[in-house]
Amino acid sequence: MGELYASTAIADLALFVVMLFEPIFLYAVLKFSIQEVLWFFAAVYAIYTLIIPLGAKVAARIGYKKAILVSVPFMIAYWVFLFGSEEMRWMVYVAPAMFAIEKALFWPAFHALIATYAKKEQRGREFSVLYAIVHLVQIAGPIAGGFLSEQFGVRMTFVIASAIYCASVIPLFWKKEFFVPQVYKFRDTWNLYKQYPKKFLGYLGFGEELLVLTIWPIFIYLAVDSYQDAGTVVTIATLVSSALALYVGKITDNYSKQVLIKIGAFFSFLVWIARFLSKAFWGVFIIDTLSRTSKDVVFIPLSALTYERSADTKILPYLVFFEQSLAIGKLLACILGIILFSMTGSLLALFFLAAAFSLLYMYL
């Protein structure tokens, strides 16, 4: 777990330098409409939904750490195609496939490492440490990304992020992974869809996260009108909410995870409804802080519950069920978002869509 903590800290520093600005780049630089931004990510999650079983097969054959290593070039390729599309437009149509392949190789292996090595009685705390690391890195990432993008342009930001991301795999190989090759069959995952229909509905709630990662950054950018200010808003909001992650992890191991998820889901619903009130810097900051807080209350117990269930069954089949359900939820959010925005022309309508998706978490 220590190796995973170190690797995650380095990888997420790179990711959060760039991530906030990916939808902003599509919207502000490539001049994509809101619908086109959503179509871009719909392509990512449509491909991801189809190929994630192949990623699990790779992880089962070569090992979890090696699968994460193999995913790195595809993340770099995604950034190359995305940010290179400013001059060569055709590259933007290849970028979603690169991103989807990276996700299919990375996420089953990453989740399997946690499910395998985290101590059963404190999975909530162990994941909350990982989540707190992500929060702390988020503090530096967006403001660094905003500064670099403002001063040196998006390309230089990408080059720096790529170098950092490549270094993230080094801690994973401090120790050799003792791994016995397995056989993954999608039939085992398919059986879980029939066995756990409510859990499938619950994981569809991650459609809300898709809108957080795509539409909300654009809204922030429109509100503050600056790469650097957008990064600063997210950084300060993350700083305020990061301490909560460790506390939520502690209570996750001692209280009902299902109850915590329901509380967090309802809180998230209310925050989405309140987003239409956010204007200018401080309004966006308050809402972003509340949003991250509600996400903590949902995501930490949800993840701990997922790792428990995967460890108690077959690890990879359950984790593919989790990630594939999540991807379907995000794809559905994109499609419904395109339809809704085409009808209303309002970002606020998408906030109400996200609020509805957040209630689905309660099915878990």
Image: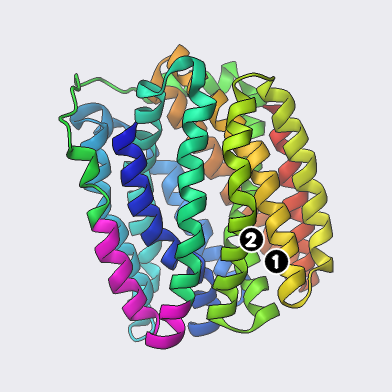
The kind of secondary structure the magenta stretch mainly shows is helix
Q: Position of residue 171 (x, y in %)?
A: 23, 43
Residue 50 in picture, x, y percent from top left: 42, 42
Identified by mark 2, the residue type is Ala
Measured along the vertical axis of the image, is residue 269 above or below residue 57?
below
Residue at image point 29% right, 37% down? 3
Above or below: residue 75 compared with residue 254: below
Q: Could you tell which of marks 1 and 2 lies nearer the N-terminus?
A: 2
Which structural element holds mark 2?
helix
* Residue 53 in sight from this viewpoint: no
Sort mark 1 into few (<14), some (14-19) or many (20+) by Cα contacts within 10 Å: many
- Marks 1 and 2 in Cβ contact (< 8 Å): yes
**In this view of the protein, which residue sits in the foreground, 154 or 145?**
145
Q: Which residue is mark 1?
A: 285
Compared with residue 176, is residue 224 higher up or lower down, i.e. above or below?
A: below
State the extent of the magenta-drawn residues as a range.
147-166
Across and down, in percent, residue 190 comes to 48, 23
Q: Is residue 11 magenta?
A: no
Find disc 2 in the rendering and name its residue: 237
On the image, the x and y values in percent for residue 16 come to: 45, 61
